[in-house]
Amino acid sequence: MPNTARDSIAEFLIANIPKRIVLSIEEALIVGAQRAYAAARGMDKGHLANALGQDRHFHMNEGFHRALAANCANPTPLKGNSLVTGTAGSITLGRLNTSIGVWNRGRSSVMRRELCEQNKHIAQFLQGDLFRVGTAPTACTIFFVACFARGPGCVLESPESIHVAVPEMEMKEWLFREPLSMFLARYDHGTQVQADRVTPKLKAAVQQRDKMLGSGDE
């Protein structure tokens, strides 16, 4: 995607989402993942992937909910497997977990697809219709996507990276996707930031390698 389009979407997001909310969500997702790992650790390897995936859902949902509530972002109630969403300005905030390199997990959720119907205006935005009367986007749905490594020898307790991502209305592709570190830099340096060719890792200095097999996705 051309930088001008990326920067235009980023500008729209930053105008609606205070930096403190993004920082709170980042911390909440990391802590939630770590709590999930602690809860699942010790499970038989035959159950580990499912247990860890389920624990991530509950612990990261709770952390996400707390971060939204602390920043007056109107979180939806915690309830079983239901999605938790919030609002910042005219933007709906959601989250999802996936494995590194797998970006189509969100489509399996009917509710996520319904949330993304309002993103049709972002598609017009990218097609150059932004300056036509009535076509500027007034709302959209974004996701904080936590990407986890999986398989023997992987570090499972924290996401390898977290991205801010805007899907198109059917969630078949992503109109905007950026590592959280790059997105946060836009608040301090304007919406135009240099492209980062390196995928950031939240625990790059971690040397200990987990012996447990697999990890679940949500």
Image (tube, rainbow, N blue to C red):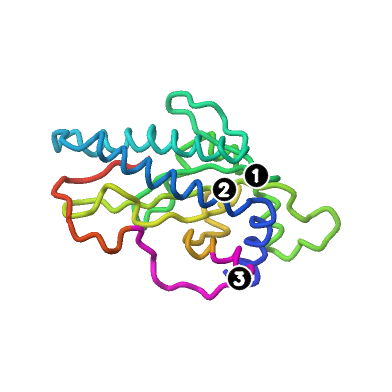
Relative image position of residue 15 (x, y in whole percent): 69, 56
Q: CA distance from mark 3 to mark 1?
A: 21 Å
Mark 3 or 1: the one toward you: 3
Name the element at disc 3. helix
| Residue depicted at x 17% and y 50% | 210
Q: Is residue 51 above or below residue 170?
A: above
Mark sitting on residue 79: none
Q: Disc 2 marks which residue? A: 21
Relative image position of residue 185 (x, y in whole percent): 54, 66
In the image, the segment drawn in magenta is 185-202
Relative image position of residue 66 (x, y in whole percent): 50, 35
Callout 2 amino acid: Ile
Task: Assess disc 2: are there few (<14), some (14-19) or many (≥20) residues with their C-alpha within 10 Å of its C-alpha.
Answer: some
Callout 1 amino acid: Ala
Q: Residue furthest bottom?
A: 194
Q: Is residue 73 above or below residue 202?
A: above
Main SS category, magenta section: loop
Q: Is residue 193 magenta?
A: yes
Q: CA distance from mark 3 to mark 2?
A: 18 Å
In the picture, measured across the screen, residue 17 lies left or right of residue 95, that is: right
Relative image position of residue 93 (x, y in whole percent): 57, 43
User: What is the quadrant of residue 97 in the picture?
Assistant: top left
In the picture, measured across the screen, residue 42 lies left or right of residue 105, that is: left
| Residue depicted at x 71% and y 57% | 124
Q: Quadrant of the N terminus?
A: bottom right
Q: Is residue 15 magenta?
A: no
Q: Is residue 30 above or below residue 200?
A: above
Q: CA distance from mark 1 to mark 2?
A: 9 Å
